[in-house]
Image (cartoon, rainbow, N blue to C red):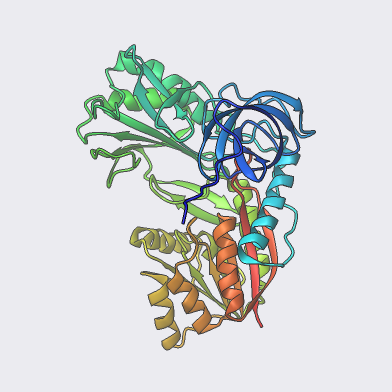
């Protein structure tokens, strides 16, 4: 039989007038030409644009905007001077109201398309002031072709640094370090790291700020433990950040783009900073996982607590408990909370945070949730409510099977990826649960990311 293959309805270098239907997860506009998707950077839904086709593949192509013929009513001028280059934000050219509207529709469409989930999706809970919200900045350093120090964030899908002086979603302390440190490096003799040659000393600088207490930690990530200029580095940081609380050195000698290494040394000040979410205090170390938007974290966790509907006599299991952030929120109203997490250090942090707050109704154990939870049930530690807060890849299949076998009455699913949430809700619904409601929460304004909390009951 003759092999007949359909060719794309457009070809490279075509100039077309197209209507933008949607956005991708990367923030690119989507137009369709005879059903063939074109992905167009900088275009927004409901716009008519003239585009230049850059590349065509079998199932989709890429184009760039030549002229916006009819702009979206939600289009605005991006306030950040680095927006066109930096990969940190994707949606600054879309009004914040427009961002929330798109995220609500995105979550609803994903639920129906991937999971065939018909539960109501509520309007996104956004921020009153969606700027300077990140309590953690991870700034890579390097040198340019002229041998000068540069610092900033990466261009989209590259490890090429955009040299920057400020960032509109970071704190003022992060801006001070971003702009000031590279000016001080040459005189100090501290060499920025070159990822290509593996030469130089200072790889990254991480700045963490506690919203509630104002405490600030700066982590200097170096290629070697021996750091001859460490006293100079401490003096520079103290000058740039007058309210500094903690200066830490982390050593990463590997040829990798992973930020942190395994060894951490205190250079000055405390080992941890203290922050609060609601009425719960947390110790944050250099490598602790802690949500980067504290204001919206409180919104997210209060939503999870609301969906758990605790009356005071329930036993709760928190899978993927991390350092115990959600667990301790739940412990305020539950009879008992048991948290499980595969990372042992996180469990130690969770235990310490429980003691810091005086909770005596919590228990934490390190191990795979799909192995630990069935053993707890065999030991008589059954749960009325199970809470999961998995990574972007969603729940492990074995954990979903565990939930369906143990059948807690109520499941609260906190998700950072609507696509895997929809997939997992479908599995749970097929196993006898019913999704009651889904509440999206905007944790990352000006990006395409959206978190959501889902509430399921056993039918």
Locate the C terminus by quadrant: bottom right
Above or below residue 350? Residue 178 is above
Horizontal and vertical percent for residue 403? 51, 77
Farthest-out residue, left: 226
Above or below residue 231? Residue 456 is below
Q: Residue at x 47, y 52 (%)?
A: 2
Above or below residue 4? Residue 317 is below
Horizontal and vertical percent for residue 412? 60, 69
Farthest-out residue, front: 1
- Which sits in the foreground, 87 or 206? 87
Residue 39 at least partly seen? yes
Compared across the picture, whether 365 is left or right of 198 comes to right
Compared across the picture, whether 159 is left or right of 318 comes to left
Could you say which quadrant of the image residue 365 lies in? bottom left
Q: Residue at x 29, y 44 (%)?
A: 261
Could you say which quadrant of the image residue 42 lies in? top right
Q: Residue at x 50, y 65 (%)?
A: 358
- Which sits in the foreground, 382 or 62? 62
Horizontal and vertical percent for residue 424? 55, 67
- Which sits in the foreground, 232 or 286? 286
Residue 132 at least partly seen? no
Could you say which quadrant of the image residue 259 lies in? top left
Compared across the picture, whether 402 is left or right of 222 comes to right
- Which sits in the foreground, 181 or 31? 31
Horizontal and vertical percent for residue 229? 25, 24
Compared across the picture, whether 32 is left or right of 350 comes to right
């Amino acid at each position: 039989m003759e092999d007949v293959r359909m060719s794309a309805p457009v070809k490279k270098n075509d100039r077309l007038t197209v209507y933008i239907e949607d956005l991708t997860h990367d923030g690119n506009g989507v137009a369709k030409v005879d059903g063939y998707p074109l992905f167009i950077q900088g275009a927004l839904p409901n716009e008519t644009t003239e585009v230049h086709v850059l590349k065509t593949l079998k199932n989709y192509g890429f184009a760039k905007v030549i002229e916006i013929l009819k702009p979206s009513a939600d289009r605005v001028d991006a306030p950040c001077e680095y927006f066109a280059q930096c990969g940190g934000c994707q949606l600054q050219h879309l009004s914040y109201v427009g961002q929330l509207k798109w995220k609500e529709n995105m979550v609803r469409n994903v639920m129906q398309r991937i999971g065939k989930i018909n539960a109501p999706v509520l309007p996104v809970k956004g921020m009153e002031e969606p700027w300077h919200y990140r309590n953690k900045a991870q700034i890579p350093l390097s040198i340019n072709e002229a041998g000068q120090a540069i610092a900033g964030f990466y261009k989209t899908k590259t490890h090429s640094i955009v040299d920057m002086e400020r960032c509109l979603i970071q704190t003022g302390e992060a801006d001070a370090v971003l702009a000031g440190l590279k000016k001080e490096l040459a005189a100090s003799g501290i060499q920025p790291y070159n990822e290509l040659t593996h030469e130089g000393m200072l790889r990254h600088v991480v700045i963490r700020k506690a919203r509630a207490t104002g405490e600030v930690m700066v982590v200097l990530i170096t290629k070697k433990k021996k750091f001859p200029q460490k006293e100079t580095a401490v003096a520079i940081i103290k000058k740039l950040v007058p309210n500094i609380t903690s200066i830490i050195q982390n050593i990463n000698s590997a040829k990798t783009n992973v930020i942190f290494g395994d060894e951490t040394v205190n250079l000055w000040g405390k080992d941890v900073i203290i922050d609060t979410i609601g009425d719960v205090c947390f110790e944050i170390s250099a490598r602790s996982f802690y949500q980067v938007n504290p204001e919206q974290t409180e919104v997210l966790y209060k939503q999870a607590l609301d969906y758990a509907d605790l009356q005071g006599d329930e036993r709760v299991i928190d899978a993927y408990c991390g350092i115990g952030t959600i667990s301790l929120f739940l412990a305020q109203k539950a009879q008992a909370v048991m948290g499980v997490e595969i990372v042992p250090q996180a469990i130690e942090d969770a235990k310490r945070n429980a003691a810091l707050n005086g909770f005596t109704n919590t228990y934490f154990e390190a191990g795979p949730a799909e192995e630990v939870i069935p053993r707890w049930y065999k030991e008589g530690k059954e749960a009325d409510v199970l809470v999961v807060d998995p990574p972007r890849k969603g729940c492990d299949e074995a954990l979903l099977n565990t939930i369906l076998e143990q059948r807690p009455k109520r499941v609260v699913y906190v998700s950072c990826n609507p696509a895997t949430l929809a997939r997992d809700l479908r599995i749970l619904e097929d196993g006898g649960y019913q999704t009651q409601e889904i509440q999206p929460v905007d944790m990352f304004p000006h990006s395409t990311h959206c978190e959501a909390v889902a509430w399921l009951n056993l039918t």
